[in-house]
Image: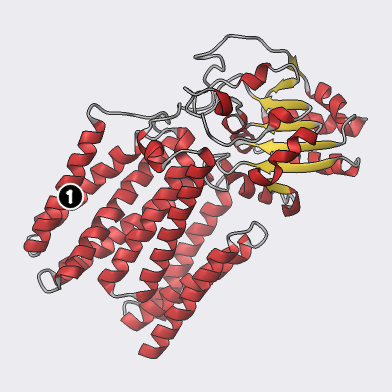
C-alpha cells in the first residue's frame, strides 16, 4: 500500500506541474486546469483511503457535495465577481491550513521535534494571515468596505509590533509546546496582521494582492504538508507558492513598481468614479454617439480594441465579440491589446474574452502590440483608464509614473467608451480624454457597443 501511495503522489505531482505549464498559455489553460483537477482528485482519494479517514462512501458523498457547491458557485458567479471568488478561495486555503495544523498541534503536543513545532507555527501564522487578508480583499472588491487605502495611525509600527509579537509567541511555543495559549496568541496576532496588512492597499493594486495571497495560501499548505509528512501537499503547496510569487513579481513589473511600494504606497481610490479633472486642469470634451463611432468605423482598415474593467462590469464581452466579427467580415484588421494589470485580477481580460469565444490568435500582450498602435486607424478603449493614461510617461508626481502603458495615444483616432469622465483606480486624471483626436462615447459599455453593432448592421 505504501508503494501505491507514493506512486500516486508522484503521479499527482506530475499532473500539477503539467497543469501549471499549460496554464501559461490561454490556448491550453483549460487543459491545464483539467490536469490539475485530476491530480488533486487523485491526491485527495489516496490520502483519505490510505490514512483510513474515510471510506469509499464518505469520499463519494463528500466529493459530490463539495463538487456540487463548487459547480453551482462557478455557474452563477459573474465575471465581475471573479476576483472576489479567487480571494475567497485563497482565504479558504489559508484557514484549512490553519485548522489542520492546529489539530495536529493538539494531537501531538509536547511529543514532536523542534522542527515540526516550527512548521506548525509557520502554518498557523501564514494560514491565518492568508485567511483574514483574503477576507479584506474580498470586502474591498465586493464594495462591502471602501476600496481606497485605509491607513491607521502608526500603521507600520503596529504591523512591526504584530510580527515581533508573533515571533515571541512562536519562541515561547517552542520552549513550552504543551502550553496551548501560545498557539492561540499566534493565531490572534496573525489574524490582526492579515487585516492591517491588506487594508492600506488600494483598488489599483488588487491584482498584485490577489497574486500574493495566492502565494501565501500555497506556502501555508506546504508548511502544513511538513507537519503531516505529506509529500504531495508539500509539492503542491510549493508549486502554488512559487507560481504566486512569480506572478506577483510580473504584476509589479507591469506597473513598474516594487512590491514594497505596492504594499506600503497606499495608492488608489474607491473606484473609477472620481472626477477626471481632480488635481489637474478642468476642461470640457465633446460627447459623441455610437452612430458617430460607426461612421468612423466605416472608413478604417485597422482597429485595436483595449478592454478594461468597465467591460467586465457591463458584461459586454459577447457583444464586443460580435462587433469584432462584423469588422473582420468587412476586411478590417481587428486585434485586442491586453495589459497585464487590466481588470482586478491577473488575466482578468483574457478570461473575460475567452468566455465570449474571442479567438486566441487576436489577443496580444502589451509588449507584442505596442509598436502597432502608431500604424493603427482606431484604438477602441472600452472601460479602461489607468493602463492607457499618458501621465504614466511624463507626470513624475503621478502614482502611475513609470508604469508601462498601452500606446493608444499613438493611434490615428482614439475612441473611449466610458460611463463618465471619472478617473481610474489610481485617482489620476487622463489627459488623453481631452486630445483633439479622441472621441468620448459616454454610456454603459454593453449599451454603447450594442448600438454600434446595430448601426454597422444597418449600413
| Residue, disc 1 | 166
The residue drawn where x is 42% and y is 73% is: 44
Graded by Cα atoms within 10 Å as few (under 14), some (14 to 19) or many (20 or more), the crowding at tag 1 reads many
Residue 358 image position (x, y, % from top left): 73, 49
Residue 14 image position (x, y, % from top left): 50, 75
Task: Count the labels in the image.
Answer: 1
Residue 447 visible somewhere in the drawing: no
The residue drawn where x is 36% and y is 70% is: 234
- Is 63 situated left or right of 1 in this image? right
The residue drawn where x is 83% and y is 23% is: 291
55 or 435, nearer to the observer? 435
Residue 35 image position (x, y, % from top left): 56, 70
- Is 189 situated left or right of 452 in this image? left
- Is 124 situated left or right of 346 in this image? left
The residue drawn where x is 74% and y is 35% is: 373
Residue 276 lies in quadrant: top right
Q: Is residue 241 above or below residue 13?
A: above
SS at circle 1 = helix
**Which quadrant of the figure contains the C terminus?**
top right
Q: Is residue 229 above or below residue 437?
A: below
Amino acid at each position: 500500500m505504501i508503494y501505491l501511495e507514493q506512486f500516486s503522489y508522484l503521479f499527482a505531482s506530475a499532473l500539477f506541474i503539467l497543469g501549471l505549464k499549460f496554464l501559461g498559455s490561454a490556448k491550453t489553460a483549460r487543459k491545464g486546469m483539467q490536469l490539475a483537477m485530476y491530480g488533486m482528485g487523485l491526491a485527495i482519494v489516496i490520502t483519505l483511503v490510505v490514512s483510513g479517514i474515510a471510506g469509499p462512501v464518505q469520499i463519494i458523498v463528500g466529493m459530490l457535495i463539495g463538487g456540487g457547491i463548487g459547480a453551482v458557485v462557478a455557474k452563477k458567479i459573474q465575471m465581475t465577481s471573479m476576483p472576489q471568488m479567487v480571494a475567497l478561495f485563497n482565504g479558504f486555503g489559508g484557514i484549512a491550513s490553519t485548522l489542520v495544523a492546529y489539530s495536529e498541534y493538539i494531537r501531538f503536543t509536547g511529543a514532536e521535534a523542534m522542527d515540526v513545532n516550527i512548521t506548525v507555527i509557520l502554518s498557523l501564522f501564514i494560514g491565518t494571515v492568508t485567511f483574514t487578508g483574503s477576507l479584506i480583499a474580498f470586502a474591498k472588491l465586493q464594495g462591502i468596505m471602501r476600496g481606497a487605502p485605509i491607513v491607521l495611525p502608526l500603521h507600520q509600527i503596529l504591523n512591526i509590533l504584530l510580527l515581533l509579537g508573533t515571533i515571541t509567541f512562536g519562541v515561547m511555543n517552542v520552549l513550552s509546546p504543551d502550553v496551548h495559549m501560545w498557539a492561540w496568541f499566534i493565531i490572534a496576532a496573525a489574524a490582526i496582521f492579515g487585516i492591517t496588512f491588506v487594508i492600506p492597499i488600494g483598488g489599483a493594486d488588487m491584482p498584485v494582492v490577489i497574486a500574493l495571497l495566492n502565494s501565501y495560501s500555497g506556502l501555508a499548505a506546504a508548511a502544513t504538508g511538513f507537519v503531516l509528512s505529506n509529500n504531495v501537499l508539500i509539492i503542491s503547496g510549493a508549486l502554488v507558492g512559487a507560481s504566486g510569487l512569480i506572478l506577483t513579481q510580473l504584476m509589479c513589473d507591469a506597473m513598474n513598481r516594487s512590491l514594497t511600494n505596492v504594499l506600503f504606497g497606499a495608492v488608489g481610490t474607491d473606484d473609477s468614479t472620481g472626477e477626471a479633472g481632480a488635481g489637474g486642469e478642468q476642461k470640457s470634451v465633446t460627447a459623441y454617439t455610437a452612430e458617430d463611432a460607426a461612421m468612423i468605423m466605416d472608413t478604417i482598415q485597422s482597429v485595436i480594441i483595449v478592454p478594461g474593467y468597465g467591460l467586465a462590469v457591463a458584461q459586454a464581452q459577447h457583444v464586443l465579440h460580435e462587433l469584432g466579427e462584423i469588422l473582420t467580415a468587412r476586411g478590417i484588421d481587428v486585434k485586442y491589446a491586453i495589459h497585464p494589470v487590466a481588470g482586478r485580477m491577473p488575466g482578468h481580460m483574457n478570461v473575460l474574452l475567452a468566455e465570449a469565444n474571442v479567438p486566441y490568435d487576436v489577443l496580444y500582450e502589451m509588449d507584442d502590440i505596442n509598436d502597432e498602435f502608431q500604424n493603427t486607424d482606431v484604438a477602441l478603449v472600452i472601460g479602461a483608464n489607468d493602463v492607457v493614461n499618458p501621465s504614466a510617461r511624463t507626470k513624475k508626481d503621478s502614482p502611475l509614473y513609470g508604469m508601462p502603458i498601452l500606446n493608444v495615444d499613438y493611434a490615428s483616432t482614439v475612441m473611449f467608451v466610458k460611463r463618465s469622465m471619472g478617473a481610474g483606480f489610481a485617482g489620476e486624471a487622463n489627459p488623453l480624454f481631452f486630445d483633439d483626436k479622441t472621441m468620448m462615447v459616454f454610456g454603459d459599455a454593453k449599451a454603447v457597443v450594442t448600438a454600434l453593432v446595430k448601426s454597422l448592421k444597418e449600413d
